[in-house]
Amino acid sequence: MTESLPASAHLLPWRLGTQEENWEGKNNVFDLKVTWIDKYESFEFSFDREVKGKEALNLTWKVNPHTYLKARIEVPRGDPNAYFHVELRSDGQDKIARLEYPIFQGIGVLGNDAERNYLAHPHATGMLFRNPFSLFRTEGERPISRVLSTEQGLPFSIYPEGYAGSAMQFMVYYAESLGGFYMACHDPDANLKAINFYKNMDDLLEASFVHEKQNFDDPDLKVSYPVVIGSLSRGDWYEGADRYKEWARKQKWCARGPLWKRANDGTASRWLTEEVGFCTFGINSRYDRSRWLRFFHEITGRPVFHVLGVNWSKIETNYMGGMASTRETWFPAKFHPRNLDTIKENGDYFAPFEFDILMPRTAPKFDEIKQNFLVVPRRIGYGVYFHGYVCPFTYFVKDLHIWRDEKLVSEYGADANYYDISFSNVFTGCFNREHGHPVGGGGWMVDAWCRLAQNTKEATIKAKGAYVPQGTEVITESVVSEIDFYQARANASPCSPMEIDFWRDWIKQGKAEKIPMFEYVYHEYGPVRMDGWAKVSHEIGDIFYWIAGRVSLWGCLFELNYEFSPLEVIDGQHENVKEHYYRIKDRRYEVDPEKVEFIREIAAARTGFAKDYLAYGTMVKPLQIKSPKIELDWFSYNTFTTDEYYEDRGMLAVSSIVHQAWRFKDNLGFMFVNLQKEDQKAKIEIDPSDYGLKGVTFKVRVITRGGERSLGSFGTERALRVDLDLPSRKIVLLELRTE
C-alpha cells in the first residue's frame, strides 16, 4: 500500500545541506557556506507488515526534480530499538554535502520533574547535563560554519573528534529512575557525522544526526549504517551505555581483544597497563630536570611514565610558534642527557611529545611541504582547524612519521611515542584533489590514520625489540585498536582546560559534570587514559583529592602536568621558567606532602591490590551510596595565560565519597575514597545478580594499602550488606572474589 500526503502536512524529519565547492581556499582551509533545504514537492509512504519478523515503514520524498530522499524505519519484534535507514538520490545539481536524518523535534520534559531529567552525551568522552530543557537556551538557527553557541546545548558535535566533538556515536536522554531514550548510530566504519541535542528556535529540545558525504564527486549519499532509537526502562545513562557496548565490542576496533589477553601475548604493553603508578606530562626535555625526575620516582619507588615536553627537537618546537618540520629540523635531538640517564637509572619510562602532523605557517620550509597538507573547513561545529595538518595519504608524512619515531626509539631509547594534535583530534577528511583519495571525509580517512599508526608501530617494535606503545592527545573509538594510551584533561573539571571549556560555568554551578562514558564502554579494551591535569602544590586546593580519586577509581593513569606552570619547589630549588617552551609565570609553590601521600595510595592500588580492576577490569554501574556533601577549594593556574579562566578559583560541592564498581572475570571490586579529613562509614548493599552473577560463592574481603581483612564467604542467593569503614583519604577495595 502506498499513500501520498501534501507537502505542507507535517514538520520534516530531515534537512539537506548544500555546500559550495570553495575548498581551493587560502592556507589550505576554507569557510563552509551551507544552505539548508527543508522543503519538498511530494511525499509517499508504504508499510511492510511482515518482513522477516519485523514491521517496516518506507518513506519517499521528492525534494525537487533533481533530488529524491528515501528512508526506511524497521521495528523488529522483541527489540526495544527502531532502525532508521536513509539514502539520497540526486543528479548533482544541488551540490548536497550532508544529510540530517532523523530529526526529532518538539522534545520536552520526561516525567513530572524536569530536575530529574539528564542528557548524557559523548562530547569530551562523556558529559552529563542536568535538566537540559531549562539549561539549554534558544540561540537561533544552527550556524555550523562558525563556532557554535554552547548555551544552545550541542547543535553540531562532530564525530569522530576527541577534542571538540564526540568520541562515540550514542547519547541518552532520560528521567532518573523512570526511563528514557537511547539514540545512536551503529556505524562500523566511523564515518563523519554530527551527534546533536539542543534547544531549537521553538524553545523545545531537538535531537538529530547529520551524515557527511564521503565523496563530494558522488551525487548520491547512501548512509550505510542505521540510526538506532530505543526505549530505556531503568532511568540512567549506564543502561544506554550497556546497549551501545553490546554493539561496539563486536566492531573492528575491539577485534584484538581485551587488554589482559594482549598483555599476556605481548601485543600490548604490560609496563604501561599495570606497572606504572602514575605519570607526568610536559616536564622540560631540553634542560636539566633530573632533580624533579628523581623526586617523582622516589614518591612510590615504583616506575613512573614521563611524557617529556615538546622542546626536544633540533629546531626547538614550542608553544610560541617554533616548529620542526622536515627531516633535517628534527635531529639531532636536544634531550638533556641527565634527564634520560635519570629516567633509565630509576627504571622509569618515557615518551617524547611530538607534534607529528601539525605544521603551521611558522614551520621551516612551509612553502615546500604545503602541498601535503589537509584541505579542510576552517571551522565546523566546535572544531577549529585553521592550523596546518599533513595528510596521511601523502608520502611526506608516511616517510617522516616512521623515520622519526624509529630514530627516537633506536637512538634515544624512547619507550613509547606520543602524538599531540593528531589522529584523534583532526577533521577526518580532506578536500585536496591531488592526494589520491576521495574528496570529502569519512571512514577511508580513519583507515589511513590507522594504517600509519600500524606501520609506525611495526618499525619501532623492530627497532627496540619490544612492544612500543603509541599515544595521542584525546581519543575516539575509531582508533582504539591502534592507540595504547591517550592524554585527556576533562576529568579535572573546573581545573581542566580545553575539552570542557565550553561548559566550565555549568560545571562550576553543578549543572553539568564529566562522566566516564568512554571508560564504561571501552576500558577493558584500552587505551589507557592519562588524566588529572594535577599539581602537587598547596595552592591547587583540596579539589586535588576529588580529581585524583575520580581519575584513579575510573581506571585512568593519574597525571601531574607541567605544560603551563612550573614544577614545584624541591629542597629550595625552583624551575627556571625562562627555559620553558611556554611563557609561564614564575610560581614558586612548595610540594604538599599530604598530596604526595595520596599519590602513594593511587600507585599502590593501580599496581597492586586493585590492579585487576583498575588496569584490566570492566566498569559496571556503581552502587547508590548516601554520603554528605563536601565543599572543596580549587585554583586553576595551569593553563594558557590568555584564557579567560586563567587564575580562576572557587569552591565546588561534591559527594564526600568517590566510588566506582568493577568486574574482572567473575570477580567484583567496589572501590571507595573518603574525601573528608575525618573517617566515615558507608552503608553498602550489593546484589550480585545485578552484575549477571548467580549460583556462585564469593570470598569477601576489604583491602587497602595497609593490608586486608576477611568478611567471610557469601552466596548469591541474597544481598550483601556491609557497614564499611572509610578512613580519611585512603583507597578502599571491597572485593567479592569467586571461590
Image: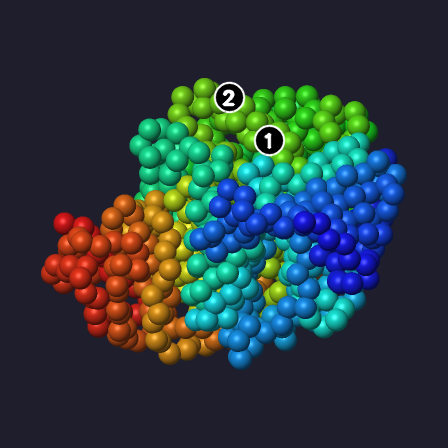
Q: Nearer the viewer, mark 1 or mark 2?
A: 1
Tally the numbered discs.
2
Residue 45 left/right relative to 669: right
Looking at the rendered structure, the secondary structure element under dot 2 is helix
Residue 395 left/right relative to 561: right
Q: Which color scheme did the rendering employ for the protein?
A: rainbow
Give the residue drawn at x 14%, y 63%: 711
- Could one spot residue 83 in this view of the protein? no
* Type of amino acid under label 1: Asp
> Is the residue 205 above or below the residue 323 in the image?
below
Question: What separation in Å lies between label 1 and label 2 (alpha carbons)?
Answer: 18 Å
Give the residue drawn at x 53%, y 79%: 113
Q: Residue furthest front?
A: 1
Give the residue drawn at x 58%, y 22%: 403
Badge number at residue 52:
none
Residue occupied by mark 1? 447
Circles 1, 2 touching at the beta carbon (< 8 Å): no
Percent across and percent down for residue 300 are 32, 50
**Quadrant of the rendered structure where residue 429 is?**
top right
**Quadrant of the rendered structure where residue 524 is?**
top left
Looking at the rendered structure, the secondary structure element under dot 1 is helix
Percent across and percent down for residue 271 are 36, 37
The answer to which of 655 and 364 lies nearer the viewer is 655
The answer to which of 545 and 593 lies nearer the viewer is 545
Residue occupied by mark 2? 459
> Is the residue 276 above or below the residue 411 in the image?
below
* Type of amino acid under label 2: Ala
Residue 188 left/right relative to 292: right
